Amino acid sequence: MAHGEPAQALLRRSSSTSTSLLTHRPPHVALAAATARVRSGTLTPEDAHSLFDELLLQATPVPQRALNGFLAALVRAPASAACSDGLSLAVALFSRMSRGHGPPVLSPTVHTYGILLDCCCRARHPDLALAFFARFLTAGIKANSLIVNTLLKVLCQAKRTDEAADVLLHRMPHLGCVPNAISYNTVIKGLCDGSRSQHALELLRMMAKQEAGCSPDVVSYTTVIHGFLKEGKFSTASNLFHEMVQQGVVPDVVTYSSMIDALCKRGRSREARQILDCVILKGLKPNIVTYSTMLHGYAKEGRLVDMNNLYNLMIGRGVVPNQYVFNILINAQAKCGLVDEAFLIFQDMQKQGVKPDVVTYLAMIYVYCRKGKMNDAIEQFNQMINMGVPPNVQIYGCLIQGYCTHGDLVRAKELVHEMKEKGIRYLGIMFFNSIINSLCKEGRVTDAQDIFDFMKHIGEKPDVIMFSSLIDGYCLVGKMQKACRVHDDMVSVGIQPNAITYSTLIDGYFKAGMVDAALTLFKEMSAKPETLTYNIIMDGLFKAGRTVAAKEKFHEIVKSGVRLSIDTYNIVLSGLCKNGCADEAIMLFKKLRAMNLKVDIRTLNIIIDAMFNVGKTEQAKNLFAAIPAKGLVPTVVTYTTMMSNLIEKGLVEEADNIFSSMETSGCAPDSRLLNIVIRKLLKKGEIVRAISYMSRLDGKGMSLEASTTSQLISLFSSQGIYHKHKDLLPARYQFFEGDIHS
């Protein structure tokens, strides 16, 4: 319709195309009927224009309340067959009002403009809203806080938060309005949405100091807290949360939910649960979002018992689980490989009338594939298709990986072709890299080779990562000839081996005892060696007992100017100690200290052991005592080294003291430590002490190692030198009673 058409033409069109909405009815009744038709989705643009034709021609002023209600319904109505764009229609009708001729029977008010601004804002048309506000100012209508607050919202939506702040702080009084909490909260939200939470906090501080004429409310604080959390500033948000409580502003469910979400994302579900319990104790009712957040936090940390208990609490408090909640529960069980538990929740989900989506089916298919239950996995796949849920690339990838991993390459190929036929985005090289790498790490290199060949068959070109993974697989099982053949194939197709490829082959040669072949390949490698390569070379030479060659290679590397990591130095220090060169290791350690190289706890463990081995007991004890000063924490290996050597030196009481300090520090002894201590004490004839540590081992549910058991049998059997002390042994070891050698 052309807006410039004469009224008579519009009337003719109206009478010929639709039934009059106004005839014989007052304007407010006609508008009420039209509003009802808008809400039912049956009012067409022609009907609306016909109504306005008649309203503009009649002499009775139209009630503003009825008119504004009609426009509000129109702009908020969802698209329907009768009218696809209510906002555009409302704008067209408003334009006719504002330029109407004759008596002002349809005069827009501040409320009319407010409705239009709000709806433009909702429809994400800030420029149109600002144009309406400019027209509002031109019309000379007195503003109120409602329309100015809407203007603030529009400016923030347009990312013009500085202008919004200027209107709030300086221009509202000139418009005859006083800013209220909604005004401030609107600008605060705009600043936080733009990652300017610190500026938002400054506005909040103004409110708190009564400079704004209104005090911050729960929305003010919650918005800024959420803004800081979104920016990753947890401590600032936490401090503001506590300040909010101290100021007497009571947090609501949204505030608490934001804090719970932030804690869960940081793996601090215990603290998050404390907040949730506090919410419940205060009589507030956590909503489905709060519970979902907490459930997801538990799921991420693998705390399934807590997750299930919370779910039961949620049900008990009348909160009905939705699709997202069920997906959290099923995913958590699936990731832990709990097939039956996942399936029970899946069944419960359907019983409660909640429809599974692609995320639900992916979790179920994943857990079945993980457990090798491919028939169950494909049954879920077929069910999802029957339920009208289209499978995506992740679903196909999961099934293909399952079939590849469990040896059914024929079915895997069928699924790949099915994907192509359905036009689903094709699985890339990275997908197959992941499968091949996993199989190789498990020692299933033959299966990996089959998938490698299958991948080439379907047209994918292997990259350097895939070739390197396959080489690693053959090296792990000691098939060096096949590893070399893969390397040659790689070069033949134009892919140059990288440092990782060479490092893998060199490591394989060392482990296969082919030291010279490893060194030859190191000399021939075309890629620049990395730290990993040097580590493998040094470790391999020391383990092969070629200490001189190792030391020469080390000095050669140092002279070349290569910057070595502490890992490399640890390999050299350990290699020197294991090959009878502990004094040299201690000298090298002193050089490292002079270089101010940052050592780690493994370095100190090696040197402490070396000092004991060369008789420097006091130096070893001093170095152990200095560990905290170096910013390090002793590990169970450190304590094992200390106790083992102290007992060896006959310093058993000092060893006991070390054990006590270990328990006090919170470092739990492991089975290896206790078994070593027991063997060392038995060897020293410290029977009572040894039995005391056996009781500790027993109390922690740990077992004797084979070498410890063998030593006990030898010492406490009928022919053993400690047979008379057999009754001192813990009850479970009384099988030494008889002469087992007879």
Image (spheres, grey):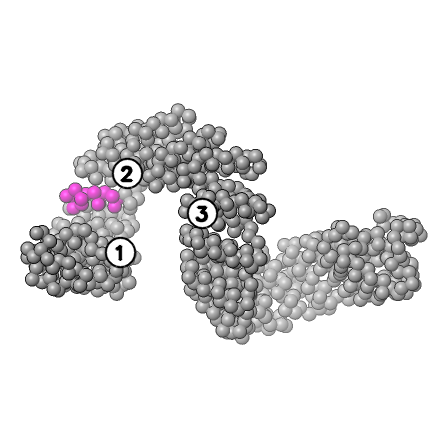
What's the amino acid at mark 1? Thr
- 252 relative to 598 in the view: left or right: right
Residue 635 marker = 1
Decide: few, some or many residues near mark 2? Use Cα within 10 Å; few <14, some 14-19, many ≥20: some
- Point out the stretch of residues depicted in magenta: 569-582
Residue 536 marker = 2
Residue visible at 79% across and 63% down in the picture: 68
The reply to whether dot 1 and dot 3 touch (C-beta < 8 Å) is no
For marks 2 and 3, give the one nearer the viewer: 3
Among numbered discs 2 and 3, the one appearing first in the sequence:
3
Label 3: element kind: helix
In the image as oriented, which residue stretches furthest toward the top?
A: 492
Q: Magenta stretch: residue 554 in it?
A: no
Label 1: element kind: loop
Magenta stretch, main secondary structure, is: helix
Among numbered discs 1 and 3, the one appearing first in the sequence:
3
Residue visible at 44% across and 56% down in the picture: 341
CA separation in Å, label 2 and label 1: 25 Å
Residue 382 placed where, x, y %? Answer: 53, 44
CA separation in Å, label 1 and label 3: 39 Å
What's the amino acid at mark 3? Tyr
Residue 624 in sight: no
Q: Nearer the viewer, residue 133 or 368?
A: 368
- 81 relative to 302 in the view: left or right: right
Residue 664 placed where, x, y %? Answer: 26, 65
Residue at image mark 3: 368
The reply to whether dot 2 and dot 1 touch (C-beta < 8 Å) is no
Residue visible at 28% across and 38% down in the picture: 536
Among numbered discs 2 and 1, the one appearing first in the sequence:
2
